[in-house]
Every structure is written in C-alpha cells, then in structure tokens.
C-alpha cells in the first residue's frame, strides 16, 4: 500500500514508513460493547476483506520481470501461514487481493481459491489497455473473482474519465457483478468520484481509507472528500491497514474518529474490516490488534454494526 507522496512508493518503501515509529503498547481491556467470538452460538465466522498471499515456488508461479525475488518480503505468505493468524480470531473467510509481484498473472490466487472452496474470494488485476480486457474480466468472474484492483500511476487517475479501456473495465465489472477496487492516494478521490458518477451501478470498494492518515495525521479535507463518495449507493470503504495509518501504533484507537465519521456517513453496511496481511503482522503489529480495533474498541458501533464491518458487508460484496 504505497504512501500518498508525489511519487508512488514501492511496497518496501511503504512498509518501511509504516513500521517506522511503531511501539509495543498494551491493549486496553475490551469494551462493554465488544462482540463475543464469532463462532459462539453457531454463527458464521468473520471475513477479512483484504489479504495478499504468495509462494516462494517461483518456478511454478513466476513473478513479473518488473520485480525481483528479493522484493518478496516476507519471502513467503501462504494460506497456511495466514490461517495461523486469522483462525484463532474467528476469521474463516478471506478476500484475496492479487499480489503485485504477479501483476496480471492471477494463477496463484485462482489456484488458492480452488484449493480451498468456500474459504476465499478474489480481487484480480487485469490490463485495462488490453484489447481483450472484457473477456479477461468475464473469465475471472467465472472462476469466482468478485473484484478488480485498479492502482493508478502518478497522474494516471485523471485520465480515467477519458480512457476507453477503463470505461470497458467499469462497464464490464458492472455487468458481471464484479466490484472495482481502487488503491489510491487521497488526491485521486475526485477521479474516483467522477467515475462513480459516469458509471452508476458499478460496485466500488475503496481500499485502506484511500490511504488517508499515511502522513501521521487524519486530514479533515481528505476525509470529507472520501465521505462525498457516500452519495453513490454502490460505494464502499475498507477500514484496513491500521499499521500504516495515523500514529501507526497498536491499539490504533487514534483511527476511531475517522471510522466513526465513515460509519455515520456511509452506514456500517457499506464499510468492511480488513487486515492487509501479511503487512499487518510485521514488527509490533498483530492480527489480533487489527480485528480488536473494530470488535473491542469501537464503542460507538452496536453489535449489529460490528457484524456488518466484520462480516456482512464483505459477504454481500465478495461472497454473494
């Protein structure tokens, strides 16, 4: 999740910034409005709406020529490694986000989904400039992919409104029940806004609060720009990547005012929690601390609201 700077930071640069200044803090006691474990009373488990997986087996799953094996940090994050973090917290379904190491080759994500039926949904990546982009989206949708990540280079988002390939991507996504998932900087929010207006009915899921807070502060104007998307009924926001935003320190309670503003504006049924593993489980950051921010510390959310963020919204968008 690159930082909102003038140039697009690499994953390694982003992770270095996100972990800088991280300190170990004890988690406060759970609030009186905390939810019980998801599995109690036979209820379905929680859904993590944003996780990356990859394998060190680069012979079977080669990475893009734009990356080096040394860029794969940690060297491995397989489903089995993920389960060790998420299952103890009652998370039993996950939305996989195509890892940038593989670029447009979605095979590792698709094979992981096929190997664990019912456990994973997927957000793939396609080349919007390819002549057969519509066919590729339809093929991914037929294999259970329910989202498409779009990640603009600097200045690129401003061209979306005039780009024929991007228009095809948004229209084909809408026709096939696939969400468009922008990974953007706050400065790109007006361009996402314009695309939502041009392509009504397309489900949109903005990743990681649009990276508001990467500088260490929650900018009120940027947050207002994100909240303006709420007028589009199909726009959603992931409350995620807590390790990288605000103070970047567990238990991340400095992010609660931003989450409350979004809950008041979008409604909990258009917000979804996600960890952004494996980056959430590096250094002083843990999976338990991520889910606890919503489950245990967001006192302004009712039990039903928390169920929306921790399961129901992601279920509706990515598992329906």
Image (tube, helix red, strand yellow):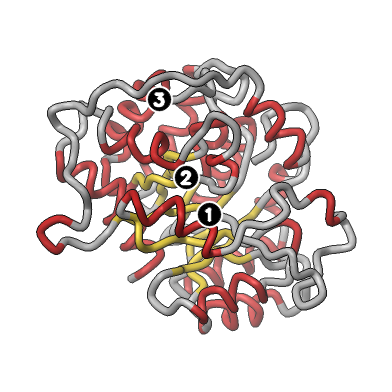
Residue under label 1: 51
Label 1 close to label 2 by CB (< 8 Å): yes
Of badges 3 and 1, the one in the foreground is 3
Residue under label 3: 251
- The span from disc 1 to disc 2 (Cα, nearest Å) is 7 Å
Tell me the SS state at disc 2. Answer: loop
Of mark 3 and mark 2, the one earlier in the sequence is 3
Counting other residues with Cα less than 10 Å from the Cα at mark 3, is it few (<14), some (14-19), or many (20 or more)? many
Label 3 close to label 1 by CB (< 8 Å): no
Q: Nearer the viewer, residue 118 or 217?
A: 118
Relative to 200, 297 lies left or right: left
Q: Residue at x 15, y 55 (%)?
A: 40
Relative to 196, 100 lies left or right: right
Q: Residue at x 54, y 23 (%)?
A: 248
Of mark 3 and mark 1, the one earlier in the sequence is 1
Tell me the SS state at disc 1. Answer: strand
Q: Residue at x 57, y 17 (%)?
A: 216
| Vertical placement of residue 270 versus 292, above or below | below
Q: Position of residue 166 (x, y in %)?
A: 67, 61
- The span from disc 3 to disc 2 (Cα, nearest Å) is 13 Å
Q: Nearer the viewer, residue 231 or 68?
A: 68
Residue under label 2: 275
């Amino acid at each position: 999740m690159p930082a909102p700077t003038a140039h697009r930071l690499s994953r390694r640069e982003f992770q270095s910034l996100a972990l800088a200044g991280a300190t170990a803090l004890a988690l406060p006691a759970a609030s009186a409005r905390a939810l019980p474990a998801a599995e109690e009373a036979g209820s379905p488990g929680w859904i993590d709406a944003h996780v990356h997986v990859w394998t060190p087996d680069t012979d079977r799953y080669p990475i893009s020529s734009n990356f080096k094996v040394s860029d794969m940090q940690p060297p491995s994050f397989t489903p089995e490694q993920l389960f060790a973090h998420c299952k103890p917290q009652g998370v039993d379904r996950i939305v996989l986000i195509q890892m940038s190491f593989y670029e447009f080759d979605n095979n590792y994500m698709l094979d992981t989904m096929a190997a664990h039926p019912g456990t994973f949904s997927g957000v793939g990546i396609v080349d919007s400039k390819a002549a057969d982009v519509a066919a590729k989206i339809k093929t991914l949708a037929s294999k259970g992919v329910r989202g498409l990540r779009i990640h603009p280079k600097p200045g690129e988002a401003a061209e979306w409104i005039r780009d024929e390939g991007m228009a095809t991507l948004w229209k084909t996504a809408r026709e096939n029940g696939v969400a468009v998932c922008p990974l953007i900087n706050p400065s790109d929010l007006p361009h996402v806004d314009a695309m939502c207006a041009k392509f009504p009915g397309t489900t949109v899921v903005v990743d990681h609060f649009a990276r508001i807070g990467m500088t260490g502060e929650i900018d009120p104007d940027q947050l207002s720009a994100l909240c303006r998307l709420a007028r589009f009924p199909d726009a959603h926001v992931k409350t995620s990547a807590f390790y990288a935003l605000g103070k970047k320190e567990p238990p991340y309670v400095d992010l609660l005012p931003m989450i409350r503003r979004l809950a008041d504006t979008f409604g909990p049924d258009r917000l979804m929690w996600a960890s952004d593993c494996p980056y959430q489980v590096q250094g002083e950051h843990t999976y338990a601390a991520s889910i606890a921010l919503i489950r245990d510390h967001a006192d302004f959310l009712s039990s039903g609201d928390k169920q929306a963020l921790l399961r129901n919204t992601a279920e509706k968008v990515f598992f329906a």
